[in-house]
Amino acid sequence: MVDFKVFDENLYLLEEIFSKDKVAVKLERLKFIYTNTEESWFKNLERFQKSEVKYILICEAPPYSETEVPIFFYNQYKSNFHKTIWKTFFDEDIIGCTQEEIYQRFADLGFLLIDNIPFAMAYSPKHRKTEAYFKLIKDSLEWTLEKMCNSKINLSKNVKIAFGFKLNAIQFIEATNGKLDCKGNILEFDNSNIGADGSGFTSFKILKRIFLEDFRNYKYFNGERVNPYCNKNKNPLDFLNPKALFWHYEASYYKNSNHQNFMLFIQNLINNKLSEYNRNENELWEMYHRNSTKQ
């Protein structure tokens, strides 16, 4: 039996976003889509009996459709979105795989998609920036977290979170303060977990970075494309702005090193290259650790 609590209690917010009249004419279809996609999502959990969830992609809601089976990640498998997720993890082409093979391989890998609002409407950027949309995400958090903490899910202690769509992600991160508690497993995330490119839509290259590349040894760099500690027209090589300075060198290492001997690189940077600028090595090491964003 599908639980309609989150749907019924937040319907008034959807009406604030779109108007009562627009929601009223779509209401029965919205209920059908919600029922169908909830059943499909829970059915997919049966595929996780032998694996733990390592990668969670948080998206908005299924797109609205007027007729036939609702468009949803766990309903059909031939969309460009499926190809994007597939290319994140697998080198071979998705063409030739059956629907069951695709979903089972995602499950065996530990990949799970979770939506964070229950209404399948055609949201525009303007809709996603409204106070009602933000409140809808916030008031749907319990529903989202219940899915994440479902008893059929064995959540990895090192689970990684990514977001599929930019504006939805920004609102969700603000609504949660970048943190969720799932059975005592504290999941933290920020804008660097957004798997969308400049268009606002999901990019397999960015998802690959978030899910598959390990930045634990980096104290400043977390895969960002632009230095977050330095204004656009400022020089990052500034001892008065150590965050920007060390981010610049860590990012340079990441792009050119194939991830070998990172600590050796840092030692050489501080003991040789940076110390040439009349800086005491101990002072440089203290600066590197004291200003670290991942202490």
Image (cartoon, rainbow, N blue to C red):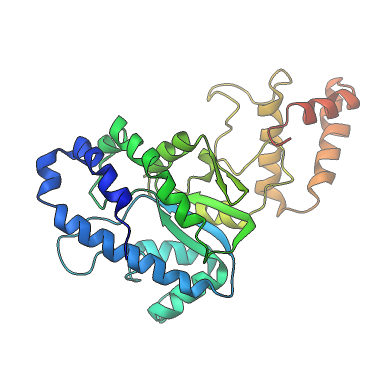
- Quarter of the view holding residue 134: top left
Q: Is residue 24 above or below residue 65?
A: above
Tell me if 196 is positioned left or right of 40 in this view. right
* Residue 212 in view in this figure: yes
- Residue 246, position in %: x, y? 71, 32
Q: Is residue 58 above or below residue 41?
A: above
Observer-nearest residue: 294 or 45? 45
Quarter of the rendering occupied by the N terminus: bottom left
Tell me if 273 is positioned left or right of 151 in this view. right
Tell me if 109 is positioned left or right of 103 in this view. right
Identify the residue shown where x is 43% and y is 70%: 44
- Residue 18, position in %: x, y? 18, 39
Observer-nearest residue: 38 or 114? 38
Q: Is residue 213 above or below residue 71?
A: above
Quarter of the rendering occupied by the C terminus: top right
Identify the residue shown where x is 44% and y is 75%: 102
Identify the residue shown where x is 23% and y is 41%: 14
- Residue 71, position in %: x, y? 27, 64
Observer-nearest residue: 145 or 82? 145
Identify the residue shown where x is 32% and y is 58%: 3
Tell me if 129 is positioned left or right of 170 in this view. left
* Residue 91 in view in this figure: no
- Residue 87, position in %: x, y? 48, 65
Q: Is residue 67 above or below residue 167?
A: below
| Residue with the most extreme top position | 240
Number of numbered callouts drawn? 0
